[in-house]
Image (spheres, helix red, strand yellow):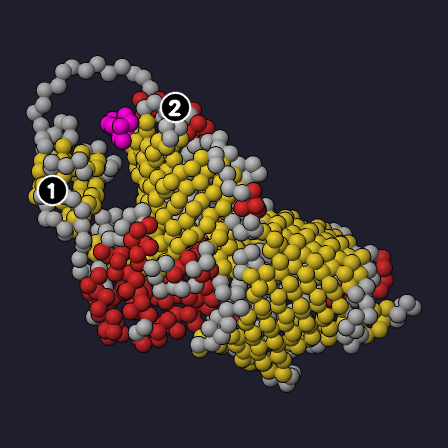
Amino acid sequence: MCVSHKMKRIFPLILVLVISTCLSMYSRAQVTKIMGKVVDAETGLPVPFANIYFKGTTIGVSSDFDGKFSLETNTPSDTLVASMMGYEMISMPVIKNKFQEIVFQMKPGNISLPEVVVVAGENPAEIILRKIIRNKNVNYKKEFDYYQYEVYNKIEIDANNVSERFQNRRIMRPFKFIFEYADTSTINGKTYLPVFLSESLSNFYYRNSPKSEKEVIHAAKVSGIENESVLQYVGDMFQNYSIYENYIPLFQKNFTSPIADFGLTYYRYYLVDSAFLSDKWCYKIMFKPRRKQELTFTGLFWVHDTTFAIKSFEMEIAADANINYLNDLVLSQEFEWIDGKYWMVTLDKGVADFNILQNNKKTLGFFGRKTTTYRKFVFNHPMEKEFYSTPANVMVSENAYKKDDDFWETNRHTGLSKDEQTIYHLVDTLRNLPAFKTWVDIFETAVTGYYEMGKYEIGPYMSMLSFNSVEGARFRFGGRTTSKFSNKSRYGAYLAYGTEDGRVKYGLSALFLLNSNPRRALSTNYKDDVEQLGNSPNAFRDDFLLAAVFRRNPAEKLSRTREVNLNYDHEWFNGFSNQINLMRKEIIPVGETKIETNNGEGIPVKKESVTATEISLNTRLAYKEKFVLGSFDRYSLGTKYPILAFEYSYGVPGILNGDYEYHKVKAGIKHWFNTFNLGWSKYILEGGKIWGTLPFPLLWLQPGNETFIFDEYAYNLMNYFEFISDEYVSLYYSHHFDGFFLNRIPLMRKLKWREVVYFRGVAGSLSRENLDYNVFPPITYSLKKPYYEAGVGLENVFKVFRIDGIWRLSHFSHENTNRFALFVSFYFSF
């Protein structure tokens, strides 16, 4: 599969992360950073809820449940103090503008306290929690008709886990100069190097009825990138969440909010302090999970004593949560009382620590940091009606990425640190190094499948050699233009040759991008090649090398096709689009494949080819769907709402030598959704019908799979051509438990494997006209009796594999079929 040009434009930045493994353990901090722990001097046990602060200042924090704390400030004093009731106060010297680790060993104090009578009753923290829940609708679901605000968003990526060993490797010598920029994090003490920075300044607009959300990005700056399409994803709409919701969706998983309506089921709460915050008296409550390996948080929040609105919070995911590649994630927000009426988020921060290996301090990793500030709130003052009707939800102003330094100095909500100021220079310098460009080429080729050569790219390399029964060894060479050739059009071509059939195959393609957002595009392609009819849309390419290696049956059912397509894509607004397609396709049987029809007297007539000309209209509705846009292609990030699709096709006889007249209709719905804390589910319901008498290659060929690579859009134990129909209805359902059961088994918990169950079935029929007209292959059967298969699987095996055991539940007597088989696939998931 190919990765978009936009993705390729940021691969140099990702490669910076790879190079960063060579960094030495320098620490050139620009602020005073302290990590530490508070323990009992006699027992060595952690002391939670201790107060740690700089002497003579109001800068301080509390130790967490493990006695740990961290502080970072530009204005420290030279002494750090720890205090806790029942212990003697203790002070430690601080070296300013350095990173340091401090352990407070607190001695029990001889404090005489008056007698206290403890009376059984409800935990005061739980009383406050119930009031927070009771006031959610007032404090969160505000009854605004309209509101708007200004957003400043900053995203930083830092390479971490630097080592002196990698620094001294020969291949890293050209990058020695970057070592001096290393710093140390107070999240976990890792040394890091800032390598990527994006900034954006935008205005967000909301209308309640009919609901509409718009963001206009006025200014944006991304280190190392001058691609306008990427700027949509540095704004605010793609990166928000709310603590008031019962679940906080992160990395396609539902984390239970600490103030969920059922929070007491998942958390323990402790009232530890009260104080004035911005002239509001607030209570400080700390919380931690009740059980291990659930998708929960540990942390604290401050709550206003009158409105019971959250004033601020800081929390991190539970250390043993079953999630991949994420060592740590810290989230925090601050709220302000705006216009004496509304609690609004004014500061939103997050820090994530990513690493391929969990809790490993030697392999490459990186921090992702997000800081968002909100200002200039305006309530119930609408924009012009036409503004809310614009087709794109995120709009980028003209020349947004060309703002000068003076503009940013004036309009940034917060200034850049010295580390952040160096990032733009660092990345631009790296990109111009010949050694860096070489690593970029290697990395891009491995990930995208194409080798870029300026205005052109060669590939895909995994299709340059493959094997099948018709062609024998197949050799292919192809390529396409890049955005350096043109950012409005792309052209591609390939040639292929088979040693067994001795034929040359080829393909040509062109795409003209009329508008990127909303998408308007014209494309055309032609191919004269062999093809596996009845493949699913998710299957590997026919000439993909791995598909040849993992076959369970020989590839002997191929057909030669001569096909030309002309497509026009028109997105009316984000999530709603139409496609008009004109296709002319000639199917020529090769190898073991034959196409025969009856002449009306029961005598089979062999057809040398079948030709159809078809015009189709496709409609797709995906409410609030988000995309990653490339220079030419785009990739869906999904939506939490069902996706509806409808296709109508008409076979046009007599045009471009089309032989058949017919009508085809297909409709479907698919939906991905979280199921509370039980994981997530996905279903696909689809049906289709054909009106017309056609040779079998033009009917519905139910998608089979004759490899051992799992394909969720195919019937994995069904052979090609096994079931053919002119009307059908199908259902796919899978549920991913995300370790819900295995996490409760001590021996399995460490493996972090995850359970999945799967079902797929189809029922259909053939009209009498199509039954009488066709001489079907001997391997083809009717769907009057539905076909079913079901399976169970394990995901997250070595973090990259999924293994499925699938059972065939009907039609056991068919030739060359399996009742059970194991399938493997690559599966990457947090």
In primary-sequence order, the first of circles 2 and 1 is: 1
Seen in the picture, residue 355 relative to 557 is either above or below; the reply is above
Percent coordinates x, y for residue 234 in the rendering? 41, 53
Percent coordinates x, y for residue 593 in the rendering? 72, 73
Which residue is at 64% across, 84% downward?
503
Residue 80 shown in magenta:
no
Of labels 2 and 1, the one closer to you: 1
Report the side of 678 relative to 329 (left or right): right
Seen in the picture, residue 617 relative to 412 is either above or below; the reply is below
The quadrant holding residue 364 is bottom left
**Measured Cα–Cα span from mark 2 to mark 1:** 39 Å
Seen in the picture, residue 404 relative to 144 is either above or below; the reply is below
The quadrant holding residue 440 is bottom left
Residue under label 1, please give it: 77
Seen in the picture, residue 105 relative to 421 is either above or below; the reply is above
Q: Is residue 380 visible?
A: yes
Foreground residue among 370 and 504: 370
Percent coordinates x, y for residue 357 in the rendering? 33, 56
Q: Which mark is residue 275?
A: none
Report the side of 313 relative to 755 (left or right): left
- Crowding at mark 1 (Cα within 10 Å: few <14, some 14-19, many 20+): some
Q: Main secondary structure of the magenta part?
A: strand
Query: Which element type, helix, strand or loop, lies under badge 1?
Result: loop
Percent coordinates x, y for residue 56 in the rendering? 11, 36
Q: Are marks 2 and 1 in contact (CB under 8 Å)?
A: no
* Amino acid on which the number 1 mark rests in the picture: Ser
Instruction: Report the span colored magenta.
Output: 272-284
* Amino acid on which the number 2 mark rests in the picture: Lys
Residue under label 2, please give it: 131
- Crowding at mark 2 (Cα within 10 Å: few <14, some 14-19, many 20+): some
Which residue is at 42% across, 37% downward?
378
Which residue is at 22% across, 70% downward?
176
